[in-house]
Each structure stands twice: as structure tokens, then as C-alpha cells.
Image (cartoon, helix red, strand yellow):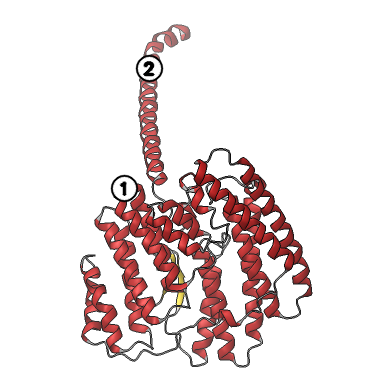
Amino acid sequence: MTFDSSFTTYPTQRKRRRGLETVFVLGFIACLLLGVAALGALWYLRGEDATSPDVADPFSLLQPDQVLLALATRDLAGDPTSALVRQALGANEIDTAAALLLFDTTSTGSARAALWQQIARAWRDSGEGASLAKSVVADAQALHMGVLDLSLHSLERGQLLTNAAAGFAESAALGNGNARDYAIAAATQAKRAIAQSPDLLPAQRGQLLQPLKPIVAQLNAPDLLAEVDDLLRNPFLSPAGVALKSTWSTLYTPPASDAGIDAAVAQRELTARNLADRYALTNGIDVEPEIEALRQALIAEDAARTAWFQSAIAGATTQQQQLGLLLEHHDWLIRKLAVANRAYGLSLMPEWENARLALEAELNGLVSNTETIVRAIADAQPTPLDQNLLRAEASMHSAQESAAGRYPGANNGAISQSLRQAQDALLAAGTTVALPILYEENAAPAGFRIQAQ
């Protein structure tokens, strides 16, 4: 009886099991379809990202296969980098111009910012989607410089930030989805710099605000537009505080020349010029001997510089001498990284390419040690005011290196905290910083920003 009862209930259980199997199969198919859709969306977005350089990383602009070797290697030959950048732009070799400027250690201030804005304009004028994204990264470099470069005069700073806002606004009008937010951020920085700089005359404020107003008007930012209008109606302000100024050139003792390094540099410049000339003449055919000669010259120069630096830093008797040596070594390390990243359009030193992460780690150490020494120099200043001004300048230098992509391991939060401490110490002693700077991780784009007083 028990057997018969169980046998008669089996068809019912089987039907139920089939129903559950159907549900599971349908559920599996639905999940599979969702997974395929999600994978497709991810693939699409990654494809979009491939044409959209990271605004926070200027080295996302580097395209070695697009660099004009015959022009770029003249930088190794000793030609002025800024002149080569302008020459590249004149030939519409925008990627070459960007590659040269990324690793340039000679241009500073408004001249360097102007080159970034010319590069951004050239990419915008090309009318391509990928180039439009690159233009935003280039304008972001100008924005960062407008905030952080202490060598800028107040009038230059206002003009630079206004121009950055204009560049972003043009990119937004051409269809870049993020550029409007960047334009608002740059215009806000321009407005704060104009309103809070104590050394601007009322007429100068009006001169800076006039071109800023139409830019803000097209951004649909009514609150910011109202603030700009208020300033235009009443530019007769008396902002409190002091503007931080660059004293960098007075902090270090330039190293004495070394005959061995001078000879190595002369040989590197000669071999680089031979390569550039030969490449232009033959269109890159049969240039292997010139490439090998330049490679050997770089090896010799690196050996000479390394030996000199180790000896000189051990014999430095003052912090000013140590700082001068670190800055000299920093510039050579940037040159090595340019070679390691093939910024000259060819593979010169495969061993440096393989050691790129180690070179970046060395660069991090150099920037960190530079700030440490400047802070030690600050501790020796005669007054608390001088001490805290120099501490703030040390942190600003690290912030600027980070924004330029030349401090890969930078802790921007820690740099911001150091800035806050120096600015708070100045305020506690009765000195207000006219343009206080802090890092804003959620800003568009993220970066160090002038704070409202």
C-alpha cells in the first residue's frame, strides 16, 4: 500500500519539478541576457574612455607613435623647447607639441600656460571628437597653473583663468559633455582671483571682469553671473590679506659647472642633431647608426651625471646647495622619463623603458626631498611670518608638480593639509592669505582650488 501510494503521487512531484526547472532555465536565460547587455555596455564605455583622456593625468595626452621624430629630437640637440613647441603647432603636429611641453622643465608661468592654451585651441580647431577631449586636458593644465603658479602677477592670473574658462566653454559648445562644468569651475576661480587679489586696481578688476561676463552668461550659471555683475558694478574693493609670491629662485645655490657633464651634454646634442638631420633627409631610412650614437651619448651622460650628483650631494655643506643639486638632478630625471616614455618618437633606451616605474619612484623621492629641504630652510627664517610663507610655498610647489603630472605618487590630501596648516598659522598670527588654496577631490576637474574668503 505504501508502495502504491508513493507511485501514484510521483507524476504530481514530477510536474512540480518540471515547473521549477522551467523557472530556473528562464531565470538563467534572463541573467545571461542581462550579463551580455552589461558586458556590452561596459565595452562601449571602455571604448568611449579610450578616446577620452583622463583630465587628471596630463600624460594621457602622450602619443609616441604620433610624435614627429625629426622635430622632437631637436629638443635633445639643445634647441629651445618652447620654440620647438611653437614650430610643431605651426606644422599642425599637435601631438608633438604636447609631448615636448609635457617634459619641458624650462618654460614657466604665463608663457608655459599660453603654450598649453595654444595646444588646446589647435585640438579644438581640428573638429574631431578625440581631439576635443584632448583640448580639455590641455586647458585643465592652464587652469591648474592659474591657481598654483606663484610666479604669476595678479593681472596675468585673472587673464589666464578667464582664458581657461573660455576654452572649456568652447569645448562645451562643440559637444564635450564635461566641459561646461569645467568652464564654471574655471570661471569661479577667475572671479575669486579677481575679487580677492589685493594688488589689483579697480580699473584692472573691471578690465578682467568684462571678458569674463559673456563667458559666464553662456554657461547657464545664474548665481555666478550675478556675482560677476555685482563686481562689475562695484570693483572698488579692498581685499584683506597678502598674495603669496614666488621666492623659489632665491632659495637655492646653482651647482657649479662640471667639465665631464659639459662634454657629455655637448656629445648628446651633437648626436641628436645628427639623427634629426639624417632622419629628415632620408625620411627615417638607414638611421640606425645615428640612433645608436645617440643612445651611447645618453648612457655616457647619465653615468657622468650620476657620479657627479652622488659626489656633489655628499659634499654639499648648506641646504641651499643641496636644493640646487636636487633641482638639477630633477631636471635630468625628467629628461630620462621623456626618453623612457618615447616622447621623442622612438625607442632610444629600452632599459630605461623597462625601469620606468623605478624612475617615477625616484622622481617621487626627489620632489618629496625638495619640499623637506625647503621646509628646513623655512624653519631658519627670522620671523614666524617668513617661516609660514615659505612653508606654504613649499607645499604649493609640490601641488604644482602633482598637477603637472611630475609627482606620480603625490598624496594631494596630505599636501592640502600642509597648505591648510601654513595658511591657518598665518591667520592665527594676524596675516590673511588673499588666495587660500586647498585640494578639492570632488571638483570638476579635481584639483587644488582658490577658496572664497
Does label 2 or label 1 sit earlier along the sequence?
A: 2
Describe the element under mark 1 as helix, strand or loop.
loop
Residue 174: percent from left, percent from top? 26, 54
Residue 452: percent from left, percent from top? 37, 79
Measure the alpha-carbon separation of dots 2 and 1: 57 Å
Judging depth in this view, the residue of 378 and 343 nearest the camera is 343
Q: Which residue is mark 2?
A: 18
Q: Is residue 399 visible?
A: yes
Q: Which residue is mark 1?
A: 128
Judging depth in this view, the residue of 310 and 32 nearest the camera is 310
Residue 377: percent from left, percent from top? 65, 82
**Residue in the image at 73% along x and 60% along y:** 304
Q: Amino acid at mark 1?
A: Glu
Location of residue 419 with respect to 185 vertically, above or below: below
Dot 2 crowding, Cα within 10 Å, few <14, some 14–19, many 20+: few
Q: Is residue 304 left or right of residue 85?
A: right
**Residue in the image at 58% along x and 41% along y:** 287
Q: Is residue 55 visible?
A: no
